[in-house]
Amino acid sequence: MKTWFGKCLIVMLFALQAQASQRAENPHPLSPRFLDVLVSTDHLTKSDRASMERRKAGDESVEWVIPVKIDLNALKGDRFEAFLFDRHVVIRRRESNLAPPQYGERWQGEVWLPGDAPDSDHMGLRDADFLIRRGRVTGAIRIGQIVYQLSSTSNGAYYIFKQDVSKLPEKDDVFVPDDAIYPSGSSTQPSYYIDLPIPRPSPPPQQIHTARIVIGFSTEAMDGNLNALVDDIHYWVDQSRSAYSASGIPLMLDVAAFAQPGYTESSISKTLNDLRRTDGPLWLLHQARHYQYADVMLMVVKGTNNWECGGTHNIGSTRETAYMVVRRGCFSQGSIAHELGHLLGAHHNQEEVGHQPAKYEFGHGYYRDSEPHSGTPGFSTLMAYQRSCLYQCPRIMRFSDPRAIHNGHPRGTPYNNNVQAILLNYGALANYYPDPPRSNQSAQPLHTPQGIRWIPAL
């Protein structure tokens, strides 16, 4: 471990020299510095260092992990600088008409590099988004396929890690067989499912609905740092909510509760099979879902780079099968929104359907390959696989829709219209459980085998 941090220190010294040379090119020298690399790591504890090293271990998409210092006051303005270890950027605030986050405040902006012309068009491939809650900040800066994610250790020390999302595995999603999820030998649900009547409304289209999600996590995914995991989950659920809103889908996503079952993971498919059983090792999520009126169950695992990014029961869902599994390392690839899209009837692009039939002939993801001769960048929507592209088509946080335009081109075709498929199902999914009674919103329940704890939300 000493060798690892020694190498990091040497690289940081070279990076600081690069920083000094870039300052002369910085078009906004008076901008406050929001994020900066720390030269000294003396303040880090042994557990801090171990936590940072584990963040990179087993994930080939993560290139490095570096401690940083943060100035929250910089987020009060409309522009700031960030030194990202291997590059220096300026970020300008961008106005947003998206729904506010469930908790905290959001700061959104566009990323500018030294040498960019004032009227540069970044084709939607550079953005920054931060969530400020409980006096702390979580977020990410995206430049094409590279994502710089901001996180913290259990002792509150900030760090960033650089992730190349193009290196995340594009294996087929895992789907479990389409059969009953009740305990073996039983034809009824557990007692805590029986006493609550579940309405089956047929809501009118385009009405705003809220889907409540109960989120469990494995021991490996928590990695000894509950606060950082909760912050990450809130941030990426909010990003998923924004993806649905920006795609014209009036679906709000709220975290209803957390569950800590003490689960040891082994694979995505095994976790899905365990999650489907109400009397299995993940029974706690079912109980938390019932008590907190949650429509969907999400289990977060850590996994390795050889694992798939997630899985669901099927294309489409019922109240009994509205569950999904997502790798924490794939949050930045939009995997929460992607797997939820499957539960809402959306499928991959046609080339990647595999053995799981589409629910709708029009409900496919869409990609447009880049055009090297013209320099026009490509893109793939949330349900499409980038591996289908001949050149490059980085994923955008939008669903396919032929009525929408991205970089001057339609974002779908009549046969690649995930938005239409989702609009047919989002109201039903958001009503798998009735709305809960009013409750104190300053804390959220954490279900454990020993009982319920409360996590401050504000």
Image (cartoon, rainbow, N blue to C red):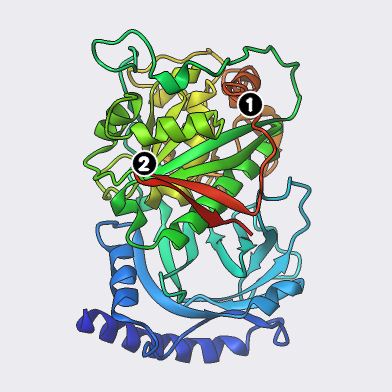
Seen at 36% across and 55% down, the residue is: 222
On the image, the x and y values in percent for residue 11 come to 35, 84
Residue 309's label in the rendered image is: 2
Q: In the image, is residue 93 above or below residue 430? A: below
On the image, the x and y values in percent for residue 256 come to 56, 40
Residue 228's label in the rendered image is: none
Is residue 321 in sight in this rendering? no
Q: Callout 1: helix, strand or loop?
A: helix
The residue carrying mark 1 is 419
Q: Which class describes the residues within 10 Å of circle 1: few (<14), some (14-19), or many (20+)?
A: many
Q: From the viewer's perspective, is 205 left or right of 297?
A: right
Q: From the viewer's perspective, is 39 left or right of 196?
A: left
On the image, the x and y values in percent for residue 65 come to 37, 71
Q: In the image, is residue 17 above or below residue 98? A: below
On the image, the x and y values in percent for residue 83 come to 54, 79
Residue 274 sits in quarter: top left
Nearest to the observer: residue 423 or residue 391 = 423
Nearest to the observer: residue 116 or residue 134 = 134
Q: Amino acid at mark 1?
A: Val
Nearest to the observer: residue 122 or residue 105 = 105
Quarter of the C terminus within the rendering: bottom right
Label 1 close to label 2 by CB (< 8 Å): no
Is residue 353 in sight in this rendering? yes
Seen at 58% across and 25% down, the residue is: 418
Q: CA distance from mark 1 to mark 2?
A: 22 Å
